[in-house]
Image: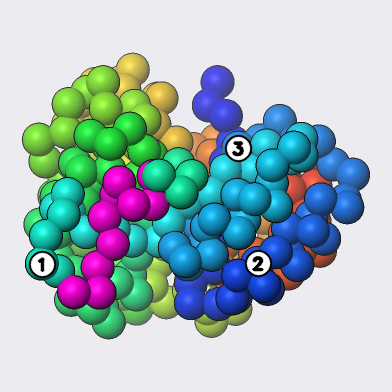
Amino acid sequence: MRKQIIAGNWKMYKTATDARRFMQAINQTDWASELDIVICAPSITIPALIEELKGTERGIAIGAQNVHWEEEGAFTGEISVSMVKEVGARYVIIGHSERRTLFGETDEMVNKKVKRVLEAGLIPIVCVGESQTEREQGRTNEVVGMQVEAAFQGIEKKDMTKVIVAYEPVWAIGTGLASTPTDAEMVIAEIRRQISHLYDVETAESVRLQYGGSVKPNNIKSFLASPNIDGALVGGASLAADSFSQMIGAMEVSS
Ligand SMILES: O=C(CO)COP(=O)(O)O
């Protein structure tokens, strides 16, 4: 049985002060969750979040949203896996469509980052997804399939089981137009089939697959009810403590 996982992607929102306020509000809610709960914050706010979580029973893990694939070097403005690991990050989002489209991140870079993150013992949340045009052309499975194959090139089976893949159709991100649970399940089931083809059935069954794109407290349950969808990667609705808590509550009910 795969453990369900909700991850908030805060993107470029929240200063450390805002992040502390969010965590203080979360710490006042009274859920105790069996889910894996992750907040992927701007790297500079990670220490503040870790500090707020100390001594609480929330079981929330913190993640980064990007790292460089080299261990260190002359890469002005970049941040390494060791740096985010040392301050307490346990997850890293890799290959988000905003990184791919706005910052020129290629499948090759995604692959190198996935390798580095795994080497460091952190968990990569690898994002894949088709654009509106690709969807209209009927190329969703082909595009997503190519992204999956490229991202995990050279990754050993034992590491693959630790990976999380987030299917985030680009047209659904930040638009309020979520995929239907049926469509998301179809693509995600295809991703699982592909992992099984690249590795084996056992590996594919152990990899957790998330849906992301306009997930909200009122629709998260419908996605989680699908057999291959193990969680959600949430942008906008993860920014407020009350909607984040509501989504966790909804997942508890559906799990
Ligand atoms: O990009 C996303 C999460 O990584 C999704 O963002 P929204 O939930 O705001 O659509």
Q: Position of residue 67 (x, y in %)?
A: 29, 58
Residue type (three-letter) at the residue carrying disc 1: Ala
Write the start and end of the magenta stretch as one range: 76-85
x and y percent of residue 87 in the render? 46, 49
Asked which quadrant contains residue 168, the reply is bottom left
| Lateral position of residue 244 relative to residue 11, left or right | right
Q: CA distance from mark 2 to mark 3?
A: 19 Å
**Residue receiving disc 3:** 36
Image-based side of 49 in relation to 201, left or right:
right
Tell me the tag on residue 74. Answer: 1
- Give the residue number, with chain letter if any, for mark 2: 19
Q: Nearer the viewer, residue 59 or 82?
A: 82
Quarter holding the N terminus is: top right
205 over 224 or under it: above or below = above
Q: Is residue 40 above or below residue 88?
A: below
As shown in the figure, which amino acid type bears the numbered disc 2? Ala
Is residue 9 in sight in this rendering? no
Question: Can residue 149 be seen from the camera position used here?
Answer: yes
Q: CA distance from mark 2 to mark 1?
A: 30 Å
Considering the image in quadrants, where does the C terminus appear?
Answer: top right
Secondary structure under badge 2?
helix
247 up-or-down from 242: above or below: above
**Amino acid type, residue under disc 3 in the picture:** Asp
Residue at 17%, 49% (x, y): give it: 71
Query: Tag 3, which secondary structure?
Result: strand
Q: Earlier in the sequence, mark 1 or mark 3?
A: 3
Drawn side of residue 103 relative to residue 9, left or right: left
Q: Position of residue 50 (x, y in %)?
A: 60, 49
